[in-house]
Image (tube, helix red, strand yellow):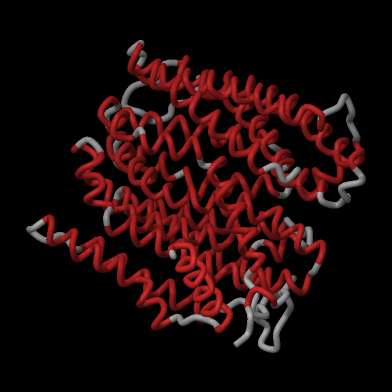
């Protein structure tokens, strides 16, 4: 029997990994650490849902969803794609070329600081004159505070990206969790203690974000200098600017449907839809964690060993699909019970869109892996081309589905659009940098999950406990069903057996 621990990573005869999953240990660790940091504020906000859902009504959540969509739209144009471009350029240089790396980071910082500041001021002047379609006009102060938080968020995220590029996972996690605690704590105090309502919520995020910005700057201050390179900026903009329409189209895919719901339905339904999104975003936390860890991991691997990278990328897609599908199944099956016990009764109808929204999240996670083949080629214009096409499809489907299906139609429009985007990305990435993806295993996993999600979502027995019991059995049976129909590779079986043996040794 082969000793899994002693076999080094190499390509095998069938194009799989040669009985070694060691790179995935590092990736899993990075996902856990970076993900905990990146998703901390969203996770803590989710934990606070029982409190906030009893303070804010569905109509209030409709306001929150609208303002969030506006702030996210401004954020799209605040970065100029430099967040991704600086990371790509940073890894063009070795660790001993710190001077070049610092010039890249400094150039990015000054550009982001000046540009995001200008854009914020212009946005404050424009947005006050626009009719957002809400039942009542928003106080100007809410919009102003939300927009003023945008450059703080942009710079704070860039500072944390520097920690990630430096491979400082602990510092990244600590500053992220600290920022989340300060922000949510401030919001809770202002909302509950001072009874400032929605105003307190946005003031809390502003002050919390500002304090977090100062802390994160202190940690990365040695990376920033009074240096600016127009040559580096041109190089990064050539990479990053094509990503701006990508980000804008992503905004359309994810957030534009809020305005369609306002137009064709009501502010209350938008608030209920927002609660559906919050539950499905629990899965998005995992996608975000994976995305943050995967990008530097795969770029570093590609720079060292392109053959190994292809096999790692292919197997990663399989694992990501299975894990995300399992998460989607759990959230979808128990969505009705979650809203029944965890939130105010006015939000119970939110369960109807959760399964569909989770499907979109699964596709987003799969794309994180697939787009690597395009990123390596630096042909980022393909990102813009395909996601704009998908966004146009999404707009058309919103017009078609939301008037008759409401928020369920909005969720379906996103799901179909992301499926089209996945197909387009996959075909182009395989043409530019082909990887031996396990298409049959991935497809079977998706089909099995879809069937179980539909069944679990529609299952509502008169006895709540019987319904919960059957749904629990579905969740428990899922890994067995996947094993039977999707199967395991020999190295995967050996790896699992080794983990079990090690666990038994520790127990004894």
Q: Which residue lies furthest to the left in this view?
A: 462
* Furthest residue toward top: 194
Q: In this view, does 339 lie to the left or right of 139?
A: left
Percent position (x, y) of residue 95? 87, 47
For image coordinates 46% across by 16% down, the residue present is: 140
User: In the rendered view, does 175 fall on the left or right side of 161?
Assistant: left
Residue positioned 65% across, 47% down in the render: 245
Residue 362, image x and y in percent?
47, 60
Q: Quadrant of residue 61 in the image?
A: top left
Taking depth in this image into account, of 462 and 172 the one nearest to the observer is: 172
- Examine the rendered structure and indicate whether residue 33 appears above or below residue 138: below
Q: Residue at x 40, y 56 (%)?
A: 358
Q: x and y percent of residue 114 in the render?
A: 75, 24
Instruction: Judge whether 262 appears above or below 216 on screen.
Output: below
Above or below, 182 relative to 430? above
Q: Nearer the viewer, residue 103 or 114?
A: 103
Residue placed most toward the observer, 94 or 459: 94
Q: Which residue is drawn at 74% across and 58% down?
A: 299
């Amino acid at each position: 029997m082969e000793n899994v621990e002693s076999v080094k990573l190499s390509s095998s005869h069938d194009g799989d990994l040669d009985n070694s999953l060691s790179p995935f240990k590092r990736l899993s660790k990075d996902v856990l650490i970076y993900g905990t940091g990146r998703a901390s504020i969203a996770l803590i906000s989710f934990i606070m849902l029982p409190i906030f859902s009893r303070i804010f009504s569905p109509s209030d959540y409709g306001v929150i969803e609208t303002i969030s969509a506006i702030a996210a739209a401004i954020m799209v144009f605040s970065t100029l794609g430099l967040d991704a471009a600086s990371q790509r350029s940073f890894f063009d240089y070795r660790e001993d070329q710190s001077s070049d790396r610092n010039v890249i980071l400094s150039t990015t910082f000054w550009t982001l600081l000046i540009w995001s500041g200008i854009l914020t001021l212009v946005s404050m002047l424009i947005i006050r004159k626009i009719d957002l379609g809400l039942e009542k006009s928003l106080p100007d102060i809410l919009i102003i505070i939300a927009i003023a938080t945008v450059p703080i968020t942009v710079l704070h995220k860039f500072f944390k990206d520097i920690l990630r590029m430096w491979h400082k996972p602990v510092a990244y996690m600590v500053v992220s969790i600290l920022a989340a605690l300060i922000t949510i704590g401030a919001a809770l105090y202002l909302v509950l203690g001072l009874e400032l309502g929605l105003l307190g919520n946005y003031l809390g995020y502003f002050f919390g974000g500002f304090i977090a910005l100062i802390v994160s700057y202190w940690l990365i201050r040695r990376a920033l200098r009074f240096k600016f390179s127009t040559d580096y900026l041109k190089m990064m903009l050539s990479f990053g600017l094509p990503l701006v329409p990508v980000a804008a189209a992503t905004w359309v895919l994810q957030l534009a449907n809020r305005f369609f719901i306002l137009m064709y339905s009501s502010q209350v339904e938008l608030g209920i839809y927002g609660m559906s999104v919050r539950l499905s975003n629990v899965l998005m936390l995992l996608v975000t964690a994976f995305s943050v860890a995967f990008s530097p991991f795969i770029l570093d691997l590609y720079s060292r060993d392109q053959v190994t990278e292809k096999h790692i990328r292919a197997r990663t897609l399989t694992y990501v699909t299975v894990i995300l599908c399992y998460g989607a199944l759990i959230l979808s099956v128990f969505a009705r019970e979650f809203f029944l016990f965890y939130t105010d009764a006015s939000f119970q109808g939110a369960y109807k869109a959760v399964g569909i929204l989770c499907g979109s999240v699964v596709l987003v996670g799969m794309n994180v892996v697939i787009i690597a083949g395009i990123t390596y080629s630096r042909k980022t214009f393909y990102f813009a081309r395909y996601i704009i096409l998908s966004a146009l499809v999404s707009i058309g489907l919103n017009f078609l589905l939301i008037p008759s299906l409401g928020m369920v139609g909005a969720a379906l429009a996103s799901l179909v659009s992301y499926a089209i985007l996945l197909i387009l990305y996959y075909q182009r990435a395989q043409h530019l940098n082909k990887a031996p993806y396990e298409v049959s295993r991935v497809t079977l996993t998706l089909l099995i999950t879809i069937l179980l999600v539909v069944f679990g979502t529609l299952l509502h027995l008169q006895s709540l406990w019987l319904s919960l019991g059957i749904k629990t059995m579905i969740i428990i049976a899922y890994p067995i069903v996947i094993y039977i129909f999707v199967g395991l590779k020999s190295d995967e079986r050996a790896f699992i057996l080794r983990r079990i043996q090690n666990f038994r040794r520790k127990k004894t």
